[in-house]
Image (cartoon, rainbow, N blue to C red):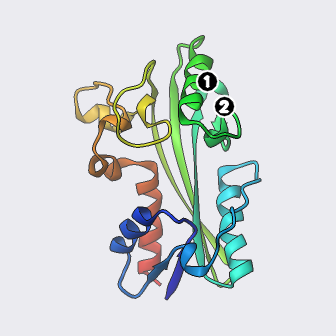
């Protein structure tokens, strides 16, 4: 079975291909001739993932999955959430997004947050969704230089328990460590388990 992963990130595709059974071949957007920007106009992370997957399925008539991820901060009523990538504006600057987040949180003592990834899989026109959530804390300053997005200011709770409650950001971990516990890894594992049973 051929399955489109709605991304052009070759690292993501290679990583997933190694996790999937040999009977499933992953295709990138580039491989199917999709060069346009995928729509992301929904009000929720789940809605955006589904919108991207159905866009590919309906236009190219290929089985597909897409993911969407957001950071949800308790004191900010779940913001930035679905707007995580463009929290500080449409220019999608990581540094500006982090600066805005730290500024917004400066008046709160509650720094609880969670990362959520939703994967939408569309097979034969029918959708299944897989969710991965990691709870943690927003640090008061950037730490580490690995990862991307909000990784320098997000410290996952599960990791703190393993290293005597010291705060370690996602950006301070190497990729193999992060991939064992991340929100995306949890959602991908659920997707892979489902595909293996087909």
Kind of element beneath mark 1: helix
* Position above or below: 120 against 75: below
Identify the residue shown where x is 28% and y is 24%.
Answer: 166
* Position above or below: 73 against 176: above
Observer-nearest of 11 and 123: 11
Residue contact between numbered discs 1 and 2, judged by CB atoms under 8 Å: yes
Find the distance from the CA under tag 1 to the CA under tag 2.
Answer: 6 Å
Q: Position of residue 110 (x, y in %)?
A: 53, 18
Q: Position of residue 196 (x, y in %)?
A: 41, 79
Identify the residue shown where x is 54% and y is 28%.
Answer: 98
Lateral position of residue 159 relative to residue 31, left or right? left
Q: Which residue is mark 2?
A: 88
Lateral position of residue 12 relative to residue 53, left or right? left
Lateral position of residue 144 relative to residue 7, left or right? left
Tell me if mark 2 has few (under 14), some (14-19) or many (20+) residues whose alpha carbon lies within 10 angstroms of its own.
Answer: some
Observer-nearest of 181 and 13: 13
Residue 18 falls in image quadrant: bottom left
Farthest residue toward the top? Answer: 107
* Position above or below: 81 against 108: below
Residue 79 falls in image quadrant: top right
Is residue 189 at least partly visible in the picture? no
Q: Which residue is mark 1?
A: 100
């Amino acid at each position: 079975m051929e399955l489109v992963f709605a991304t052009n990130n070759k690292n993501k595709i290679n990583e997933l291909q190694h996790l999937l059974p040999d009977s499933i071949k992953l295709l990138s957007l580039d491989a199917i001739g999709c060069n346009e920007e995928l729509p992301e106009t929904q009000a929720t992370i789940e809605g955006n993932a589904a919108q991207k997957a159905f866009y590919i399925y309906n236009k190219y008539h290929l089985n597909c999955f897409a993911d969407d991820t957001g950071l949800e901060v308790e004191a900010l009523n779940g913001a930035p959430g679905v707007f995580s990538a463009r929290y500080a504006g449409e220019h999608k600057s990581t540094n500006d997004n982090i600066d805005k987040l730290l500024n917004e949180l400066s008046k709160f003592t509650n720094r609880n947050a969670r990362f959520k990834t939703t994967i939408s899989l569309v097979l034969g026109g029918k959708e299944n969704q897989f969710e991965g959530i990691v709870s943690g804390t927003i640090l008061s300053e950037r730490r580490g230089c690995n990862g991307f997005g909000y990784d320098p200011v997000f410290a996952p709770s599960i990791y703190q328990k393993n290293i005597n409650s010291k705060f370690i950001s996602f950006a301070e971990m190497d990729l193999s460590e992060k991939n064992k516990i991340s929100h995306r890894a949890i959602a991908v594992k659920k997707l892979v388990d489902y595909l293996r049973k087909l």
